[in-house]
Image: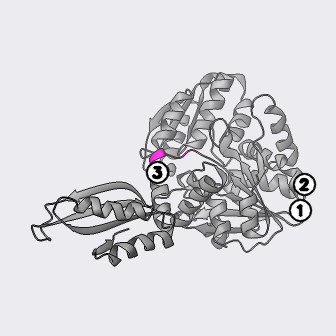
């Protein structure tokens, strides 16, 4: 049954002293860039790093004493798992979590730290969830859905209450869609408070399950592919979630992997905000102009910040290359004393920073008296990078830019 605004308000009361409202900040940078008012709802700053503690805590707090004694089980790619483990620990309930075998190591370790018992099973969320259902049938543990549950949806809907003071007739709320719990709860709260608010959902091109379902006018399953936004790589929306989305959501768009990476980088550089792939999808869709629903004010829900450190490093490196702030060049020099010093002196004069250097004297493509030097250089942008290359060419070096 579809939760009501009253269900969401009751969930908010249960959170008092347990879950704090997340910050809602105005972004001057993105506002100036777009010409609209841009607000960011920072669910990445929740204790487990995502909004999922809301639905998990609300659902678990309503369990009967005998259900709590048997314990709970759930399946998740990470954030719901952390939410259930976190909420279970606070309510004195034993939690068992089924996670896909290729789950993020950061999220896996976090679940264990919060006290959850982890079982690794399957290649994706769907297989993990099927295994969790089987364990629930055999053991009597209460299955806690990640999204297709009225009380889970009501918990997520408390975000809508927290942004009620900035809602108006010319406002769009943009949030990610996986199984649909987050957008369902927010949509019910926001649309009940102001029917003129527009709700926009964002999926990845790697897993557009809600988009395909809306096209078919029923929940359908799609094939999932690897994505930075693993938190929303859900192959089929929940039945209840789909009916709410169909009723309340105005638009759903899909973003690609490069757009997601760019949004993660922009949030980090321009807002000092760490977002995981799913959390960055609203900004990705907005920055790429994919949202046809125009508004004076946009509220982008940054739903989570649980991202691997090495993923951030790769995104930063790729982003730096795209912006011309990191280049890699090959230069051939005479294998003689002072040759390398002369090359590095020119680079230093052009104020480029040498990050890495590889001096290869054994490159068989070159004559024996020639060495090949590969340099990773930090520059101030495309113009500066080109100026460095041009200066090297002007003094006679043969330069090949690799990156």
Q: Is residue 142 visible?
A: no
Can you say whether 232 is above or below 34 in the image?
above
Where in the figure is residue 305, as x and y percent of width and height? 60, 46
x, y percent for residue 351:
45, 61
Residue sitting at 81 percent across and 69 percent down? 295
Contact, CB < 8 Å: mark 3 with mark 2? Answer: no
Mark 1 secondary-structure assignment? loop
Q: Are marks 1 and 2 in contact (CB under 8 Å)?
A: no
Q: State left or right for residue 255 relative to residue 170.
A: left
Q: For mark 1, what is the residue?
A: 195
The residue tagged 3 is 313
Alpha-carbon span between mark 1 and mark 2: 7 Å
* Cα distance between the residues tagged 1 and 3: 42 Å
Please tell me which of labels 1 and 3 falls first in the chain.
1
- Badge 3 crowding class, 10 Å Cα cut-off, few under 14, some 14 to 19, many 20 or more, is few
Q: Are marks 1 and 3 in contact (CB under 8 Å)?
A: no
In the image, 7 versus 287, the foreground residue is: 287
Front tag of 1 and 3? 3
Whether residue 309 is in magenta: the answer is: yes
Q: Quadrant of residue 296?
A: bottom right
User: Residue 228's x, y, as percent?
Assistant: 51, 56
Magenta stretch bounds = 306-311
Q: Which image quarter: residue 17?
A: top right
The residue sitting at the left extreme is 368
Question: What residue appears at the point 83 percent right and 50 percent down from the top-left corner?
Answer: 163
Q: Quadrant of the C terminus?
A: bottom left
User: Where is mark 2, residue-wise?
Assistant: 193
Please give the name of the residue rendered at 48% of the width and 67% of the height, measured from the top-left corner. Answer: 324
- Where, by quadrant of the figure, is residue 71 drawn? top right
């Amino acid at each position: 049954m579809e939760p009501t605004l009253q269900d969401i308000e009751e969930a908010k009361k249960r959170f008092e002293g347990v879950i704090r409202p997340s910050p809602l900040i105005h972004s001057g940078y993105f506002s100036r860039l777009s010409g609209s008012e841009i607000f960011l709802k920072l669910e990445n700053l929740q204790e487990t790093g995502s909004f999922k503690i809301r639905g998990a805590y609300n659902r678990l707090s309503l369990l009967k004493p005998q259900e709590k004694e048997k314990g709970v089980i759930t399946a998740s790619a990470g954030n719901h798992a952390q939410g259930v483990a976190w909420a279970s620990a606070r309510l004195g309930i034993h939690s068992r979590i089924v996670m896909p075998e290729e789950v993020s190591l950061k999220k896996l370790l976090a679940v264990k730290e919060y006290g959850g018992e982890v079982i690794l099973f399957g290649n994706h969320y769907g297989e993990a969830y099927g295994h969790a259902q089987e364990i629930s049938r055999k053991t009597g543990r209460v299955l806690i859905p990640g999204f297709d549950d009225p009380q889970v949806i009501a918990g997520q809907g408390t975000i809508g209450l927290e942004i009620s003071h900035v809602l108006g007739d010319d406002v769009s709320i943009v949030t990610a869609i996986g199984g649909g719990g987050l957008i369902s709860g927010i949509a019910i709260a926001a649309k009940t408070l102001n029917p003129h608010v527009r709700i926009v959902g964002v999926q990845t091109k790697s897993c557009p399950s809600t988009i395909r379902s809306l096209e078919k006018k029923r929940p359908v399953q799609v094939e999932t592919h690897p994505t930075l936004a693993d938190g929303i790589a859900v192959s089929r929306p929940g039945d209840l979630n789909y009916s709410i989305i169909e009723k309340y959501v105005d638009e759903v768009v899909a973003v690609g992997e490069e757009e997601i990476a760019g949004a993660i980088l922009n949030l980090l550089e321009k807002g000092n905000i760490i977002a995981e792939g799913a959390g960055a999808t609203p900004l990705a869709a907005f920055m790429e102009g994919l949202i046809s629903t125009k508004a004076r004010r946009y509220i982008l829900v940054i739903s989570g910040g649980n991202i691997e450190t090495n993923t951030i490093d790769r995104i930063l490196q790729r982003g730096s290359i795209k912006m011309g702030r990191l280049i890699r060049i090959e230069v051939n020099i005479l294998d003689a004393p002072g040759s390398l010093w002369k090359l590095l002196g020119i680079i230093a004069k052009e104020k480029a920073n040498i990050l890495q250097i590889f001096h290869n004297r054994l490159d068989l493509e070159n004559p024996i008296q020639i060495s090949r030097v590969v340099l990773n250089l930090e520059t101030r942008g495309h113009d500066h990078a080109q100026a460095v290359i041009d200066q090297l060419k002007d003094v006679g070096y043969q330069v090949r830019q690799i990156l």
